[in-house]
Amino acid sequence: MAKQPVVYILASKRNGTLYTGVTSNLPKRIWEHKTGAFGGFSHKYACKRLVWFEVHETLENAILREKRLKRWRRGWKLDLIEQSNPQWIDLSSRLDGPI
């Protein structure tokens, strides 16, 4: 899965604080979130559980999708997560690469 544009949502816990991001290397970025390599919102609110992600053809498309998702209401994001991950399991174990 390395080097593919991806939009992702992290959660602190089920129905907890959400963080929406974009990257071209999801395994590496999730590792950074989990180890606290960088400060910021996701570190402050302990958003470490990968609960949703979407692969895109281009980074430009992924960035556009991320910007749209960030404007969504919280309820819409919760519905999006629950459609594909109703148990809110951490999907990071399903990724190739270091987590």
Image (cartoon, rainbow, N blue to C red):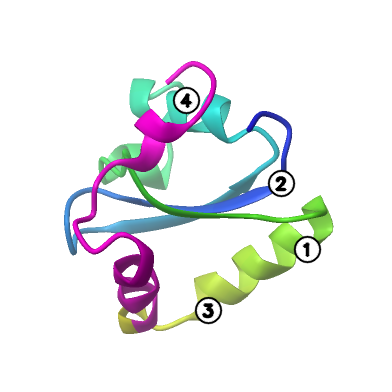
Q: Position of residue 44 (x, y in %)?
A: 30, 41
Give the residue at x 31% y 73%.
Answer: 78
Q: CA distance from mark 4 to mark 2?
A: 17 Å
The label shown at residue 5 is 2
Q: Residues within 10 Å of mark 4 (few under 14, many from 20)?
A: some
Q: Quadrant of the N terminus?
A: top right
Residue in the foreground of this view, choosing between 13 and 39: 13
The residue under label 1 is: 61
Above or below residue 6? Residue 18 is below
The mark that comes first in sequence, 3 or 2, is 2
- The answer to if 65 sits in the magenta stretch is no
Q: Residues within 10 Å of mark 3 (few under 14, many from 20)?
A: few
Amino acid identity at mark 1: Asn
Give the residue at x 65% y 32%.
Answer: 25
Above or below residue 60? Residue 24 is above
The label shown at residue 37 is none
Give the residue at x 41% y 33%.
Answer: 94
Q: CA distance from mark 1 to mark 3?
A: 16 Å
Give the residue at x 48% y 31%.
Answer: 95
Q: Nearer the viewer, mark 1 or mark 4?
A: 1
The residue under label 3 is: 71
Image quadrant in which you'd find residue 28: top right
Local secondary structure at mark 1: helix
Q: CA distance from mark 4 to mark 3?
A: 24 Å
Q: CA distance from mark 1 to mark 2?
A: 8 Å
The span picked out in magenta is 76-99
The residue under label 4 is: 32
